[in-house]
Amino acid sequence: MKNTLETRLGIFFALAFVAAVVILETIGGLEFFKRGKVIAARFTNVLELNEGDPVKMAGKQIGRVDSIEFADDKVRVTMKITDRQARIRTDSRATIRFTGLMGQNYVAIEFGPGKGPEVESGFELETFEQPDFNQLMTKLEGVTTGIKKLTDNFSDSNLGDMILPFTDFLNESKPRILTILSNAESISAQVASGQGTVGRLLYEDALYASALATVTNINQATADAQTLMSDARAVVADVRAGKGTVGRLMTEDKLYTETTEAVANLREIMQKINRGEGTAGKIVNDTALVDNAKLTLQKLDKATEGLEDQGPLTVLGILINPLF
């Protein structure tokens, strides 16, 4: 009997222990017994974060907040990471977020670019701040106040004052508006019946054919221009390659040498002429030759005047005299 009671008590306590373990595991109460990394982050405001609040990465819980304490004008949050699959790198960043308006705050760790190594225990992550709920509510209250002021400005009296000038304008412009609408209706009817320039553009096959021919000519001209450009490129390529007369003129050194020699020879000839060397130099520089030429011309002029004074008979006698 005694053994049976002890057995029942042992089974009861064993089941109670198993149930407690299951419950604690379900609610996350066994984080203390799990092995993992301990990392930290510093915040200027923890936004009512508490010890035991979850630590998440990409929305998945990977650990819990282990401790919260002041450190160098900031709050140092120590976290225990128990999920071995979580790859927290040295370039990852931490922030504090909340789930819903009345939800629980938690530490969110963002993935890094993937270039840094995985953190070890004791590493301190970089952080960035999120606006807290009070700041959001303050901004929302400001927006609500602005909307209320805007709606107050659009009260019945103000709205009537705003619409009245527009109503007067419509009443004054009603005849003109009706005329414009009538003209638009008439124009649309003419276009629909193929009248006028626009109507002919839309409905006449001859005009369509003419436009099509124009487009064809433009395409042909474009093709010809492309052919001309291809030929021009070929000519330029030949010139650069030294082909043809122009190419040889542009690329051969022999032509350049000959031209240089010709210019040098011409310069030498001009220098000789300036020095009075050679026939051309004497003609240009010898004044005696010029004087002789002037004297000869003067004698010829006097002889011509003498012939004019003697008359035709004297000239005839001069011509016949050698015959006798």
Image: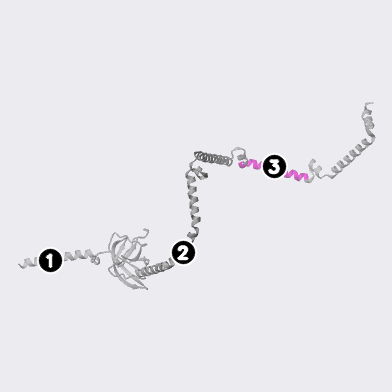
Residue 150 on the magenta span: no
As shown in the figure, which amino acid type bears the numbered disc 2? Leu
Q: Helix, strand, or loop for circle 3? A: helix
* Image quarter of the N terminus: bottom left
Q: Which mark is residue 225?
A: none
**Numbered circle sitting on residue 164:** 2
Q: Earlier in the sequence, mark 3 or mark 1?
A: 1
Residue placed under numbered mark 3 in the picture: 262
Rounded to the nearest whole Å, what is the CA distance between mark 3 and mark 2? 95 Å
| Residue type indicated by callout 1 | Phe
Disc with the residue nearer the chain's start (2 vs 1):
1
Based on the displayed image, in which of its 4 quarters is residue 145 positioned? bottom left
Density class for disc 3 (Cα within 10 Å; few <14, some 14-19, many ≥20) is: few
Q: From where the camera sits, is residue 171 visible?
A: yes
Colour treatment of the image: one colour
Left or right of residue 74, residue 207 in this image? right
| Residue 123 in sight in this render | no
Q: Which residue is mark 1?
A: 12
Which numbered disc, 3 or 1, marks the residue closer to the eye?
A: 1
In the rendered view, does 239 fall on the left or right side of 204?
A: right
Cβ atoms at labels 3 and 1 below 8 Å apart: no
